[in-house]
């Protein structure tokens, strides 16, 4: 009788041990650092086409300078695709349209926290900082130039910001949402 009880107890210990090993293995697999660094599962063609259409609509709203609707559209895109870079950059333009450069700078910095290699946003940050913090602007422009040395607009902006030329217009490209610093306006003598 003791051997039967001993045999059942040994089987029970073996099953518990196997269960614990299974649990530990699953925890290790799902928390392994490599899993966190993997690219997300690619979206379907339908999803990609939908996002491209949204981007086209958002770009059109920005070109028409309909910033209120552009902001709504960008926020709706971000609800569907939270880390969509284009809509996040569009929000920078919308903040500038409200003359809120502090929020635009804050938005640039938020983007750079999640996408530090984004040369366009670094360039946008350099443009925004060019009047208030020229040294930080020069650093941001230099980093943007290192990240995208072939981009003509980034290269021109880096030169202008580095040389601190006041009368030059910083280059703009709506397709990539590079921001433009408006040239000084002449006052009418009325």
Image: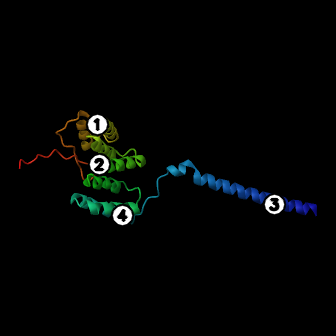
Could you say which disc has been placed on residue 76 in the image? 4
Residue 53 x %, y %: 31, 64
Total tally of numbered discs in the picture: 4
Q: Closer to the camera, 17 or 102? A: 102
Q: Earlier in the sequence, mark 1 or mark 4?
A: 4
Residue 39 located left or right of residue 85 = right
Residue 21, by quadrant, is: bottom right
Q: Earlier in the sequence, mark 2 or mark 1?
A: 2
Q: Closer to the camera, 68 or 21? A: 68
Q: Which residue is mark 2?
A: 101
Distance, label 2 to label 1, CA atoms, is 15 Å
Distance, label 2 to label 3, CA atoms, is 69 Å
Instruction: Kindly report which numbered mark, 2 or 4, lies closer to the viewer in this rendering.
Output: 2
Q: Earlier in the sequence, mark 3 or mark 1?
A: 3
Image position of 158 with respect to 13: above or below:
above
Distance, label 4 to label 3, CA atoms, is 57 Å
Q: Which residue: 36% across, 46% down?
A: 118
Q: Which residue: 88% across, 59% down?
A: 6
Q: Is residue 56 visible?
A: no
**Element carrying mark 1:** helix
Contact? badges 2 and 3 (CB < 8 Å): no
Q: Which residue is mark 1?
A: 134
Q: Which residue is mark 3?
A: 11
Distance, label 1 to label 4, CA atoms, is 34 Å
- In the displayed image of the protein, which residue is found farthest to the top? 163
Q: Earlier in the sequence, mark 2 or mark 4?
A: 4
């Amino acid at each position: 009788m003791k051997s039967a009880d001993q045999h059942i107890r040994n089987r029970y210990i073996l099953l518990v041990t196997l269960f614990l090993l299974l649990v530990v293995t699953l925890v290790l697999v799902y928390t392994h650092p490599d899993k966190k660094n993997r690219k997300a599962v690619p979206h379907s063609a339908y999803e990609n086409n939908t996002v491209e259409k949204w981007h086209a609509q958002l770009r059109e709203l920005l070109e028409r300078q309909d910033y209120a609707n552009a902001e709504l559209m960008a926020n709706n895109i971000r609800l569907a695709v939270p880390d969509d870079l284009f809509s996040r950059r569009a929000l920078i333009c919308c903040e500038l349209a409200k003359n809120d450069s502090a929020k635009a700078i804050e938005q640039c910095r938020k983007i750079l926290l999640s996408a530090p290699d984004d040369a366009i946003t670094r360039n946008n940050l350099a443009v925004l900082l060019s009047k208030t913090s020229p040294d930080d602007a020069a650093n941001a422009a230099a980093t943007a130039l290192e990240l995208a040395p072939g981009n003509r607009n980034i290269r021109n902006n880096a030169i202008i910001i580095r040389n601190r030329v006041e009368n030059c217009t910083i280059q703009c490209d709506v397709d990539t949402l590079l921001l433009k610093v408006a040239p000084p306006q002449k006052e009418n003598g009325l």
